[in-house]
Image: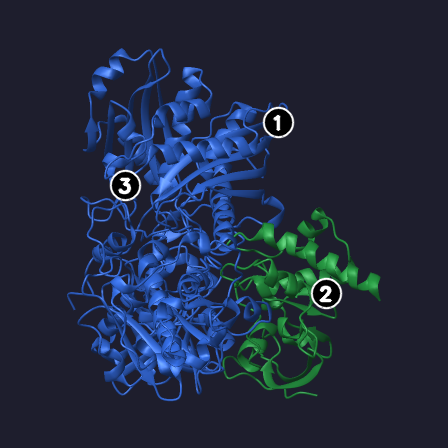
Chain colours: A green, B blue
Amino acid sequence: MGIIKANKRDIFERVIMTNHHLNINGKPHVVEDVEDSTPLLWILRDTLGLLGTKYGCGIGSCGACTVHIDGIPIRSCALPVSAVDGKEIRTIEGLASRDGALHALQQAWVVSDVAQCGYCQAGQLMSAAALLDGNPNPSDSDIDEAMQGNYCRCGTYNRIKSAIHLAADSLSGQVGKS
Amino acid sequence: MNKLSASPVSSFDSLELLFDQIDPSGDISLPTDIKMDRRSFLKVSGVLGAGFILAFSLAGKSNASASTGRLELNTYIRISPEGSIFIFSKNPEVGQGIKTSMPMIIAEELDAEWNDVIVEQSPINEKLFGRQNAGGSRSIASNWDTLRKAGAAARHMLIEAAANEWRVPAVECTTAKSHVLHVRTNQKISYGNLANQAATLVVPSESMLKLKDSRDYKILGKRITGVDNYALVTGQPLFGIDKVLPGMLYAVYEKCPAVGGTVASANLDEIRKLSGVKHVFILEGNGNVMELKPGVAIVATSTWAALQAKRQLKVVWDERRASKDSWISLVKQALVKNKRPAEKILHEKGNVDAAMQGAAKSLDALYSFHFAAHATLEPQNCTAWYQKGAVEVWTPTQSPGRGLTSVANILGIREDKVTIHQERAGGGFGRRLVNDPACEAVAISKHINAPVKLQWTREDDMAHDFYRTGGFHSFKGGVEPDGKISFLEDHLITFSHNGEKPVIAGVPRQPSRVFPAQLIKNFRLSQSLLPLKTTCGLMRAPESNTTAWAVQSFLHELATAAGTDHLEFLLELVGKPEWLSPKNQYGLHTGRAAKVLRLAAEKAGWAKQRPAGRGLGLAFHFSHAGYFAEVADVSVSASKRVTVHSVTVAADIGPVINLSGAENQCQGSVIDGLSTMLGLEITMEDGRIQQSNFDTYPLLRMSQAPSVDVHFIQSDNPPTGAGEPALPPLAPAVCNAIYAASGYRVRTLPITKEGFST
């Protein structure tokens, strides 16, 4: 499907350049002629201009680059774009509804005034959203476990935890009403 | 070329100057923006069709708006006819919440409805705004009066405009929620509808301004959520790293892993051939490690292409003048120094030697602490566009004013050819007081004559920090039979770049005011220096963040030796309420200290017995004009596993501006301090930093984070900052709790060095 060409860098060290069909936040994107090994993070940021997903470490350790792949939170800084062809990718820009209504977690983050510098918070929200998708009423230790891959250098962990509980309560209230 | 061969550490005087500017405890004259100059005046200019602009500026510096034609430049407040109230926040936002709290002060005195307020980051223009800096927890303390008066002056003029309109006396008018009201005639008009008329009025003199009684506050002291919260949770571009310019290229910059090294050669021709690479070249540096170190720049069509090329880059470094620092060796040298008399006495009172002979009980202990990195989660970066002898810079910096000077220096252009845009920073902690990324970015942009975003990797960030210095406190102390301290000696073994002057934040800046020097009869602080080339800098609560740990731990040792409850010991030590020298905001008030100690103890349940293996630890520290006492509740297992259950914080920073923001800062300071003391350590060997990323420098994660309860005493003192002073008492509170829980005295940080785990 793609163009395979030898890199001028080294004829023996082939770099596979391919077109990739990415489904991001419900929209199809064709990303042309990029190295298969390029991490999804840099495709999002540099190629597609989706800047909400952040670079923090490049080794999948800090969680600032967390996105959902088919609903599972994954560190996009160490995830080759070739691995996500055709999969459903969700980023922080796609967490709110299409009509702009904020996700319960986003609302909880705003009213709880979670952020300090805010740099990690997109990744925190994506990890938290995946948690609530699978576990609508998480305990403190469920939250600790689900959020273990996300650093907050400013130390807003107390507020992150209470905001997740707040969002869970708000979502269960909505379910109850409907 | 002389400059290039200069010692890599020769330039640190400029960081010291910055410390002078941001450290309120220093004996320094305050910058002009702290005090309202008597000649200060308010200036108003009408803006065609855009409402009302109020500028609040210093005498002699009032022409900026007229001369530049950019009318926003000298304003704090702009009101549109539609009713939106635009308020400039003048200082960098690095997570300390200043972009919300400064405009709150203006909006309060303006009597604006907070929902009508739109906050914008101001341009960098220190002639107009005074010092624009994020450091020393001083933004609130030094701008409090200026910002209140800016709001009050605008309110005054809006009232006058309404009074003119209604033909009623101005004194009969009141304001509420962005409206002027005249109750007797039952009239009400919005600020938006008054903006154009107000702009034509004469500006009130300062003496005419009436500031609100704090009891009438509707915004200040409340929980106000951050003005950027919506943008943050929806992933909108806000940070330096998010800047995109048309036609922008992406750069990385490789420097010698040992500071002071220069480029001997590199495989530039190979790199040039790589996919996506547009330019690769050597920059020689300017001899100032705080501006431009020598290195190899790679410019590519994407960040990833640049990063890939950097991995292929092979540089031969000339390390003849480079750092050979070894932490292992430095520790050994420190132990030798510890056995010798101190090299220099920094402060002495009473007769320590005599007291030492006569003390009922005496102790000595060596406390060692590690180097630490800032590790801002947003790695250093900067976007720059040099063209035709001028440059624009988009930079997440804590010191944009100094950045402007450095950038002009690097490019050899006048400062008025430099425009700095302050971008939100993904954490600062003192790292971004140095503008080396901006210097690199502008040098690269000039070389390629194109807009460029320079991106440091996490590894670059950890290898080229300005580290929080490590060091050693060698204490001797004694207690009298009645439990009072008879003497205290602290021999501080620290480092020097030039053999004479300690590294920045290596020793207390006011040795005579080190706690508890002013409260005891016999005290001596002395220093010895070890040679160092590793670059040092300012990190959140500089010097306090390590001195408080050592001193407050050793005071607990003395209390224990005296058989006195730690709280009682500290209360006895601070004694009766009085101001200590210099008897102003930046001197310790013992009564305020006692109050936070009592409050922390009360809220933490100090008197309550804990089960075996669990204990409470207490510590107090005064810095940045803020009083903080903290109690940690800690369990220690038989295998030396430490669990910090909770931390109780009692604080007196005067009236709190933003309750939500201040509480968040205190909680964050506690987590930050805990992260650093538990297991983070920067070491160096052969001049190279041994840690490279979060796998070797693992920050605290959520499961290790205690709950942090913050209690404010809203005293009737001038308000001051919350970004730093909650950090210093954390480490000693935890170590004192470890002692209470286990009987083990921690004298080395991080505590993993003493076999503890978390």
- Mark before the other along the chain sequence, 3 or 1: 3
The quarter of the image holding the N terminus of chain B is bottom left
Residue B270 in view here: no
Q: Is residue A1 left or right of residue A35?
A: right
Q: Tell me whether circle 1 and circle 2 mark residues in contact (CB < 8 Å).
A: no
| Mark 1 secondary-structure assignment | loop
Q: What residue is pinned by disc 2?
A: A72
Determine which quarter of the picture holds residue B234: bottom right
Q: x, y (%) of residue A94?
A: 66, 74
- What's the distance in space between the residues labelled 3 and 1, CA to CA? 36 Å
Q: Is residue B599 above or below residue B44?
A: above
Residue type pointed to by label 1: Ala
Determine which quarter of the picture holds residue B619: top left
- What's the distance in space between the residues labelled 3 and 2, CA to CA? 49 Å
Foreground pick, B640 / B666: B666
Residue type pointed to by label 3: Val
Say the numbered circle drawn on residue B507. 3
Q: What residue is pinned by disc 1?
A: B638
- For image coordinates 35% across by 28% down, the residue present is B574
- What's the distance in space between the residues labelled 1 and 2, CA to CA? 39 Å
